[in-house]
């Protein structure tokens, strides 16, 4: 009985901390470095189903927490509170891009300049996992990072479509189909439909098609649908376990998908993290420098500037915690890999920059060390 209890506790710990994501990443890295050919033969067919379809539910859960944080009692309940993370996201993109371009121009080779957008990205999955591990449940740094990361990825996908189109954009198709999706979601809510499946399969599928045919990444398909799901009027706090006791559609959606999303993250790490460690070069170091330095500097400077100009950041979020969030947000991984493959053809330059995106995981232990140095010192006082 005790063994079963310990196993259940361990399993719950693994799921609640998204450790399956790390398992998938470690397996992919090890396999790719032992036998890249066999790894790619298995991983490549997974890309579409995991990156384009499965991850839509992870982004939906992240959007759920951010949306609820904007409700009464939430950390982002006012417009002034929301502006801060949005401005911080802009800073977290401009400064890394500037650092990358400067290094490519000053040191070379110039061909690397085309990859200026690679360090602009923040990986929601890993960054949120690190933030949740560092900060206690309900800490305003977590919704701040989630909103920042979602804004970062949304802006990043626009950059991907505009500057690195894989084909002709179809803005008209995007607008028309997305309008139908949002109107359908609104109609379902007005009719009091009580099943989250109808929202996901109906308007969610239309939103996915709109993004796909419009030239944007469809993994954000459920993000605009989440606010239309019937929800509670007040926020209990980020990842509050009492949400499972509420009968509204949005909380039921979050409760049902919590565990399947962890399996999706496991497969996502496996399908995307397999890059041989031998494939390093100038592009690797430029991406790393831009992410590890540019992200925290940009987020800290722009969020501080937003506060000076009147924007209110969430209560209980001091500068030290913003700095920690900035380091956690320096994990580029997912969208950084998309930018790399869009910017460069197969060859050494692509391999170098992809390796920089993968090695941005270094930001995770750095965030923990910074947290220990800043938050530990304050606690001691």
Image (cartoon, helix red, strand yellow):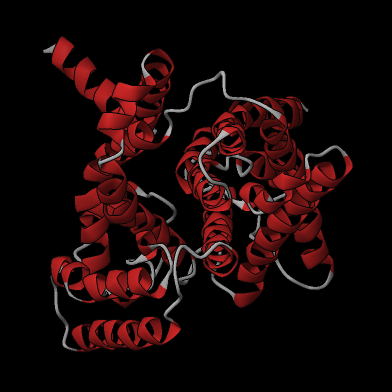
The C terminus is located in which quarter? Answer: top right
* Residue 375 percent across, percent down from the top left: 70, 32
Does the rendering let one see residue 233? no
Residue that protrudes farthest toward the left in the picture: 1
Q: Residue at x 50, y 64 (%)?
A: 74
Question: Viewer-proximal residue, 128 or 219?
Answer: 219
Q: Residue at x 35, y 55 (%)?
A: 61
Q: Residue at x 14, y 72 (%)?
A: 198
* Residue 290 percent across, percent down from the top left: 73, 42
Question: Viewer-proximal residue, 204 or 228?
Answer: 204
The N terminus is located in which quarter? Answer: top left
* Residue 188 percent across, percent down from the top left: 19, 83
**Image side of residue 220 versus residue 209, left or right:** right
**Image side of residue 166 versus residue 269, left or right:** right
* Residue 81 percent across, percent down from the top left: 63, 68
Does the rendering let one see residue 30? yes
**Image side of residue 196 versus residue 109, left or right:** left
Choose top left, top right, bottom left or bottom right for residue 311. bottom right
**Image side of residue 106 versus residue 248, left or right:** right
**334 w.r.t. 372: above or below:** below
**173 w.r.t. 146: above or below:** below
**328 w.r.t. 277: above or below:** below
Choose top left, top right, bottom left or bottom right for residue 321. top right
């Amino acid at each position: 009985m005790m063994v079963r209890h310990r196993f259940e506790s361990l399993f719950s710990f693994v799921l609640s901390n998204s450790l399956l994501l790390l398992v998938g990443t470690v397996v992919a890295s090890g396999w790719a470095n032992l036998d890249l050919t066999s790894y790619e033969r298995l991983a490549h067919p997974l890309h579409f189903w995991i990156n384009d379809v499965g991850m839509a539910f992870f982004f939906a859960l992240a959007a759920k927490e951010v949306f609820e944080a904007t409700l009464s009692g939430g950390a982002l309940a006012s417009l002034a509170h929301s502006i801060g993370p949005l401005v911080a996201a802009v800073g977290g993109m401009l400064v890394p891009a500037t650092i990358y371009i400067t290094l490519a121009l000053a040191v070379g080779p110039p061909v690397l300049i085309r990859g200026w957008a690679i360090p602009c990205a923040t990986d929601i999955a890993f960054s949120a996992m690190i933030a949740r591990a560092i900060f206690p449940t309900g800490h305003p740094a977590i919704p701040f990072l989630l909103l920042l990361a979602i804004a970062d990825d949304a802006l990043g996908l626009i950059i991907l479509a505009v500057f690195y189109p894989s084909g002709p954009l179809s803005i008209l198709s995007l607008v028309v189909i997305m309008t139908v999706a949002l109107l359908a979601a609104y109609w379902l809510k007005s009719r009091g439909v009580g099943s989250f499946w109808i929202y996901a399969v109906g308007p969610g599928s239309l939103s996915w098609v709109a993004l796909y045919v419009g030239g944007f990444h469809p993994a954000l398909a459920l993000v605009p649908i989440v606010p239309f799901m019937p929800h509670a009027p007040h926020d209990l706090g980020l990842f509050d376990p009492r949400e499972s006791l509420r009968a509204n559609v949005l909380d039921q959606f979050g409760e049902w998908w919590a565990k399947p999303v962890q399996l999706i993250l496991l497969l996502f790490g496996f399908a995307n993290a397999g890059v041989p460690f031998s494939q390093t070069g100038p592009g690797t170091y430029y991406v790393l420098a831009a992410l590890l330095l540019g992200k925290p500097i940009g987020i800290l400077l722009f969020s501080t500037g937003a506060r000076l100009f009147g924007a209110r950041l969430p209560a209980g979020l001091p500068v030290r915690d913003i700095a920690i969030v900035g380091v956690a947000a320096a994990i580029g991984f997912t969208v950084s890999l998309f930018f790399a493959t869009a910017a460069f053809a197969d060859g050494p330059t692509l391999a170098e920059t992809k390796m920089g995106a993968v090695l941005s995981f270094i930001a995770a232990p750095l965030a923990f060390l910074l947290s220990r140095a800043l938050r530990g010192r304050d606690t001691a006082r």
